Amino acid sequence: MRSILTSLLLKKRKWRVASIGFVLLLLYIFGVNAGIPKTLGTGNQTSWLGIDNKPVTSRERRKLINQALSQSLLKNIYTPVVNPLNLSSGSENLKVLYTFDHELQKELESLLRQYGSDYASVVAMDPSTGKILAMASYEGNMPSSENWALKASFPAASVFKIITASAAIEKYKVSPGMEMGYTGGNYNLYKRDLFNDNEKWARSITFREAFARSINIFFGKLALKFMHGDDLMNYAQKFYFNKDFMTDMPVELSKALLSSADPFHVAEVASGFNNLNTLSPVHGALIASAIVNDGEMKSPYVVESLMKADGTPVYRSMILSLESPITITTAKTLRDLMNETVEHGTSRKSFRELARAKHFSMVEAGGKTGSLNGTHPKGKTDWFVGYARLGTRMLALSVVTVNKTYWKVKSSYIAQRLIRKHFKDEVVLSSVHAENHEPSF
């Protein structure tokens, strides 16, 4: 009797297995899952967007968006519709939804109109995603006919000290408290001071102070004393100088050039005291994003989605991870140096207003300034590349202003105002929450 029951059970199990297999075969043949979009993370996974009905990678989609919008973006025009061939079936116009935060963008444009620098460009970015939250390019107090945010024609100036500091911290374990003596002026770079081994009249300064005050001779000596010839170029490439960072915008490549055979040239590059190395505002925000985001870089993007007239999405943005230029530990140390810049260094006056503002002490901010005469556009270039964060919320900023004759506003002040605007609501809510939980006596 037992053997008969066992036989029946086995036959029933085989029938169930066969039934399941038959159903799966039907699903495969008729493509029941064909209408379900696949999700896309980072890397080379495919999704429902394709070219000629063939799936493409997220990187390839970024290139297509770049090509479709490049002509308008280069002219500083954010077109509301686009007709990109190969992005969807048919040739209908597609509505473009940009990534901008309306309130932050409004504040940015108001600031640039108010101060009317000869040239100005600003990029604000969410470091955790790469999303561009605000971007503008102005000449005087009017929107520019060229999108300077995409141009890498600005001298990187002392912003390049971030690259030098990264190499010193990560590869050679130089601590912020390391002291070194120097002679000469703070913002010049002469061979007689650079190669002067007589410490009799030297004044001593720490790495942290030299970064905050942007002492050129210190960084020149730092590179010659600790680094090999290729270190600066290696770390520049880690931070995506001379490299494409897979954005959906037509951003020019930032340039880093170095002749390691000439010690004085190495010192010039290390301190940012040269016109050969260039930087775009978008790239500046990307560099800052890696520092505040513990060394992780996300490719910047400005298009959130593309939709048909009936609202059907044809394209949705995806987060693309780039190679990490630095470790978590190095990023933390760089934040220490950059925080010193806004508290006691070259940006202290611009950030004094934020420091005195009620409840804003909970917002961590840092940055690096840089200034040098440039040729395209012509004038004194002034940089602020920095970050702010409150809890898990982060902001990366890149501000550049150029003035031909006299200063109208410092780039660091514009950055401070944007930080204040971006975190205002969260600071108020956090403050109210803290006040409601204060002990009563």
Image: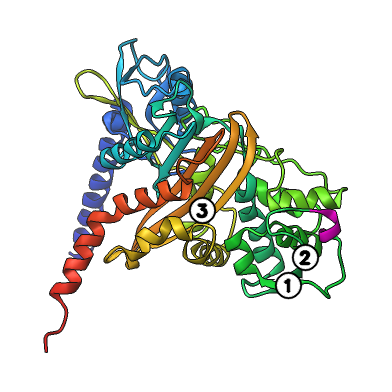
Mark 1: few, some, or many residues within 10 Å (few <14, many ≥20)? few
Q: Residue at x 57, y 49 (%)?
A: 323
| Place of residue 70 in the rendered image (x, y in percent of width and height, measured from the top left) | 47, 21
Is 290 on the left-hand or right-hand side of 48? Answer: right
Q: Which residue is mark 3?
A: 290
Instruction: Give coordinates of residue 440: x percent, y percent.
Output: 11, 85
Amino acid type, label 1: Arg
- Residue at (47% x, 61% y) in the render: 348
Q: Is residue 191 magenta?
A: yes
**Nearer to us: label 3 or label 1:** 1
In this rendered view, identify the residue nearer to me: 31 or 69.
Answer: 69
Amino acid at the residue labelled 3: Ala
Image quarter in which the C terminus is found: bottom left
Residue placed under numbered mark 1 in the picture = 203
SS under mark 2:
loop
Where does label 2 land, which residue? 183
Magenta residues? 190-194
